[in-house]
């Protein structure tokens, strides 16, 4: 079994804890489903949020999904002028037999414009 990395992002409509929980849960669920993964396949997950998001920790959504024994961390994304606002990104390290080229990186909604080269 190889260690792989999968990326993803989602743009929130507003900075509210319940909305963040909903959108991050949707993103994490899509990453798992599109790569045929379970929580047991996760090694660790990094979340970043743009500086305009501060209502909650994105990792809290993962805990609510039952991902309780996987190391999670949150950080603030760089504050770049003109960058897309209200974005949560994730980088998940996983165990998978999928070839690197077959990993499905998940960019939901408007966030798909962030990485047109790898978004699936």
Image: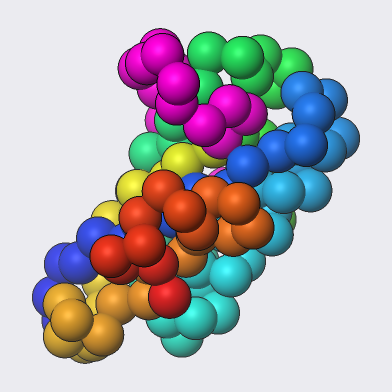
Above or below, 56 against 46 in this view is above
Which residues are drawn in magenta?
68-87
Query: What colour scheme has been applied to the protein in the rendered image?
Result: rainbow
Residue at 30% from the left image edge and 67% from the top image edge: 118
Residue 88, horizontal then vertical, whole percent: 54, 37
Residue at 47% from the left image edge and 53% from the top image edge: 113
In the image, taking residue 47 as reference, residue 4 lies left or right, namely: left
Looking at the image, can residue 72 be seen?
no
Above or below, 72 against 16 in this view is below
Frontmost residue, 24 versus 14 = 14
For residue 77: magenta? yes
Above or below, 41 against 69 in this view is below
For residue 113: magenta? no
Above or below, 31 against 108 in this view is below
Residue at 61% from the left image edge and 14% from the top image edge: 52
Residue at 79% from the left image edge and 48% from the top image edge: 22
Residue 73, horizontal then vertical, whole percent: 42, 30
Looking at the image, can residue 115 be seen?
yes
Q: Quadrant of the N terminus?
A: bottom left
Residue 101, horizontal then vertical, whole percent: 18, 81
- Displayed quadrant of residue 78: top left
Q: Quadrant of the C terminus?
A: bottom left
How many badges with numbers are in the image?
A: 0
Q: Give the farthest residue toward the front.
A: 82
């Amino acid at each position: 079994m190889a260690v792989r990395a999968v990326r993803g992002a989602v743009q929130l409509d507003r900075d509210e804890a319940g909305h963040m929980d909903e959108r991050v849960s949707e993103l994490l669920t899509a990453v798992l489903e599109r790569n045929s993964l379970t929580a047991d396949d996760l090694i660790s997950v990094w979340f970043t949020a743009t500086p305009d998001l501060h209502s909650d920790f994105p990792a809290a959504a993962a805990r609510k999904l039952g991902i309780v024994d996987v190391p999670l961390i949150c950080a603030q994304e760089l504050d770049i002028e003109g960058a897309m606002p209200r974005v949560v990104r994730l980088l998940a390290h996983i165990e998978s037999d999928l070839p690197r080229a077959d990993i499905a990186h998940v960019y939901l909604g408007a966030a798909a414009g962030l990485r047109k080269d790898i978004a699936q």
